[in-house]
Image (spheres, rainbow, N blue to C red):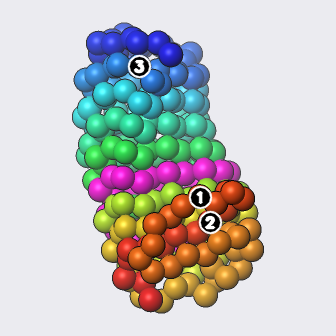
Amino acid sequence: MNQLYEEVPETISRLANLQWILLCTNNFSGGIPRDFGKYSPSLSDVCFSDNSFTGELPRDLCSGFALRYLAINGNDFTGPLPDCLKNCSGLTRVRQDSNQFTADMSAFGVYPNLDFISLSNNQFVGNLTAQWGRAYKSHEFEDRCNDLTGKIPDEMGNLWKLLSLNLSNNHLAGDIAISLGNLSKLKEKKRNKIKYQKRRNGFGCCLARNSTR
């Protein structure tokens, strides 16, 4: 582990051939330069995890729509998400957990190659829409401890590769989608006011502390 600190310099935004950047697990602080990603159309892998970054993500972070890996968890990012994120259909792994994002879930697009996503411990609002049912390759879907409302869409039952689904500690309501019964790889299905605990086999589903009945 390194212990790099201070802020990321503005000059990093001018790297036209930049394809990946890994600054995870350091002591960086401040905001990401405003134009980061704007002049790097081939940027595919971004890791800013476990630092002390603040502020909003750059609006052109993924303007080249080449982004596949985005890990920005464990910071103090705030505000909405960049509009370009909706069009990054090649995303395979996303970690935005443990920040202070206030975006609506409509900020996300359709990600048919998505394998893992964690949006937990933020302030995301809105509904889980039917488009999430098109992330057919997903193995883990984590969206706990946010302010989600509405029902769990029936289309979530299309994610037949899911090993873990955690939507606990939101404001979801209504009936459990019958289609979730199709997710045969979820070895445990848990309801009511219980804590999610990962069992030895590593599979599970938690919908705890919602209004779902």
Dot 2, crowdedness within 10 Å: few (<14), some or many (≥20)? Answer: many
**Which residue, given by chain and number where applicable, does mark 2 sit on?**
204
Q: Which residue is mark 3?
A: 26
Give 57 or 30, whichever is nearer the viewer.
Answer: 30
Amino acid type indicated by mark 2: Gly
Asked if the residue under mark 3 is in contact with the one under mark 2, i.e. CB atoms within 8 Å, the reply is: no
**Which secondary structure lies at badge 1?**
loop
CA gap, disc 3 and disc 1: 28 Å
Q: Which residues are magenta?
A: 106-130
**Taking 47 as reference, is 12 left or right?**
left
Q: Within the magenta stretch, is there residue 119?
A: yes
**The image quarter in which residue 52 lies:** top left
**Image height check: is 55 above or below 12?**
below
Dividing the image into 4 quarters, which one contains the C terminus? bottom left
**Secondary structure type for disc 2:** strand
Which tag, 3 or 1, sits closer to the chain's start?
A: 3
Magenta stretch containing residue 87, yes or no? no
Vertical relation: 108 (above or below) 152: above
The correct choice, above or below, for 177 with respect to 40 in the image is below
Q: Between tags 2 and 3, which lies in front?
A: 2
x and y, in percent, of residue 142 in the image: 51, 57
- Mark pair 1, 2: CA separation: 7 Å
Amino acid carrying label 3: it is Asn
